[in-house]
């Protein structure tokens, strides 16, 4: 089970996540209590091994904002809303993870089951979450399970140590993503919760 720990803001919790077995670490470059600057992210992620993906998490960035993050942070992955990518110059060296939000519908792309969402189809790796990132909103897992049959879905939104095993058993995603549920206060990550979440998610895969 692919596990991403998002909203990291210091070297300690990056190290904790990596040592506990995280497959990706996310750094937020959007308005949030977890926001970091590109050079700050580069510093705190400097010891992340090549086997762990460093993800730039953005929301409706201008191409200029994205280019600053690319230049100063040099992420492995750009994660932002699916419709944002049409305005961004993303080199082939950077993976694109579009975020598909539950309930978003516009008439330009048909997805599995006849549902529509802006931008590209579900393919490759993508995130599926609620309307607001980092808010702890849980999506409809039964709906997510249908979409997870296509591409590599990373399920996000409202996942925690207590429910990630159930979410994995129902949705059967490629991966899971957590931020607020591994915090002791908004924006303050908790080392023990990070470890427990990764352990729970990895263990849940063995029951599928």
Image (cartoon, rainbow, N blue to C red):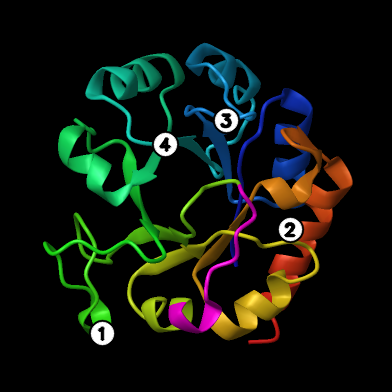
Look at the image and give the residue range highlighted in magenta: 135-143
Q: Is residue 85 left or right of residue 22?
A: left
Whole-percent x and y of residue 44? 65, 21
**Discs 1, 2 touching: Cβ within 8 Å:** no
Q: Disc 4 marks which residue?
A: 76
Q: Disc 2 marks which residue?
A: 198
Q: Is residue 73 left or right of residue 123?
A: right
Q: Which of 14/187 is in front?
A: 187
User: Per the image, is 116 magenta?
Assistant: no
Give the residue drawn at x 49%, y 69%. 174
Q: Which mark is residue 113?
A: 1
Give the residue drawn at x 35%, y 15%. 68
Q: Is residue 150 above or below residue 157?
A: below
Decide whether the magenta segment is chiefly helix, strand or loop: loop
Q: Residues within 10 Å of mark 4 (few under 14, many from 20)?
A: some
Q: Which of 163/46 is in front?
A: 163
Q: Which of 41/34 is in front?
A: 34
Between the C-alphas of marks 3 and 2, the distance is 23 Å
Q: Quadrant of the N terminus?
A: bottom right
Give the residue drawn at x 60%, y 22%. 46
Whole-percent x and y of residue 93? 29, 36
Between the C-alphas of marks 4 and 3, the distance is 21 Å
């Amino acid at each position: 089970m692919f596990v991403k720990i998002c909203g990291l803001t210091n070297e300690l919790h990056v190290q904790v996540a990596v040592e506990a077995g995280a497959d990706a670490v996310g750094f937020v470059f959007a308005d949030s209590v977890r926001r970091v600057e590109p050079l700050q992210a580069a510093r705190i992620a400097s010891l992340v091994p090549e086997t762990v993906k460093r993800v730039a998490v953005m929301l409706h960035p201008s191409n200029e904002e994205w280019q600053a993050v690319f230049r100063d942070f040099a992420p492995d992955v750009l994660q932002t809303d699916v419709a944002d990518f049409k305005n961004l110059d993303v080199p082939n060296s950077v993976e694109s993870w579009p975020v598909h939000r539950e309930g978003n519908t516009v008439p330009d792309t048909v997805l599995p089951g006849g549902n529509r969402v802006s931008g590209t189809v579900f393919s490759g790796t993508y995130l599926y979450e609620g309307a607001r990132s980092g808010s702890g909103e849980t999506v409809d897992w039964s709906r997510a399970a249908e979409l997870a049959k296509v591409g590599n879905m990373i399920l996000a939104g409202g996942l925690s140590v207590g429910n990630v095993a159930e979410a994995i058993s129902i949705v059967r995603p490629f991966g899971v993503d957590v931020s607020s549920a591994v915090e002791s206060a908004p924006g303050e990550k908790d080392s023990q919760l990070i470890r427990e979440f990764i352990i729970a998610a990895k263990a849940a895969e063995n029951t599928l």
